Image (tube, rainbow, N blue to C red):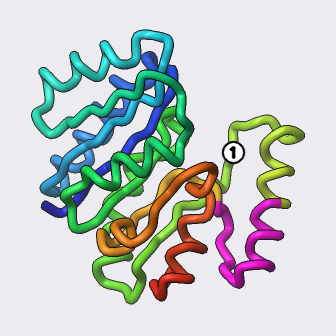
Amino acid sequence: MQLSIVIPFYNEEESLPELISWIQRVVDTHRFSYEIIMVDDGSNDNSWEVVKKLQTQNEHIKGISFQRNYGKSAALNEAFKAALGDYIITMDADLQDSPDEIPELYEMITTGRYDIVSGWKKKRFDNALTKNIPSKLYNYVTGKLSGIQLHDMNCGLKIYRSKVIKSVEVYGEMHRYIPVLAKWAGFKK
């Protein structure tokens, strides 16, 4: 299987149907073999019911449901354990990561010399004071300390070779540092 598309989410019942439909259009158009691993991080809305309904419409969807909110790192870690694809794509469920980027990410990682390719939210829809400025500061400081220069370390849209994901354990808030952990393990970004 080429792709495991991992989507951790919390209270995203409204965006999930549109996101899955969008992903399905893209992967079907490009004839990727794939699975979609959706991880409900303890939602208290109807997100899990939406996932179960989507599973009846698309056999490629796998679901993992937490009983309570453990955080994005725990959700990603469980999905990474379950992933069967040669390449693992992570994306957020809030529709800020475009599935239209999947073919380009796939091409970059399969034809390049990289083990990780990270997306970049050039246009952000978040609050400038509470999200955008802190994110820029975080990217700058993390880049200086780690030696990894990414435009957007926090972007949820990334693709990894399976061997990268299978070699790192993600916990706490470590999902933010997967590129750093991978570099320390000898992989190339």
- Say which residue appears at 33% left-offset and 72% top-offset: 161
Where residue 46 sits: x, y (%)?
Answer: 40, 10
Quadrant housing residue 141? bottom right
**How many numbered marks are there?**
1
Q: Is residue 172 magenta?
A: no
- Say which residue appears at 75% left-offset and 65% top-offset: 139
Report the side of 63 relative to 185 (left or right).
Answer: left
Residue pointed to by mark 1: 124
Report the side of 108 relative to 118 (left or right).
Answer: left
Where residue 11 sits: x, y (%)?
Answer: 51, 20
- Say which residue appears at 47% left-offset and 32% top-offset: 9
Q: Is residue 150 magenta?
A: yes
Q: Secondary structure at mark 1?
A: loop
How busy is the neighbourhood of tag 1: few (under 14 within 10 Å), some, or many (20 plus)?
few
Quadrant housing residue 17? top left
Q: Look at the image and give the residue range highlighted in magenta.
A: 138-153
Quadrant housing residue 104? bottom left
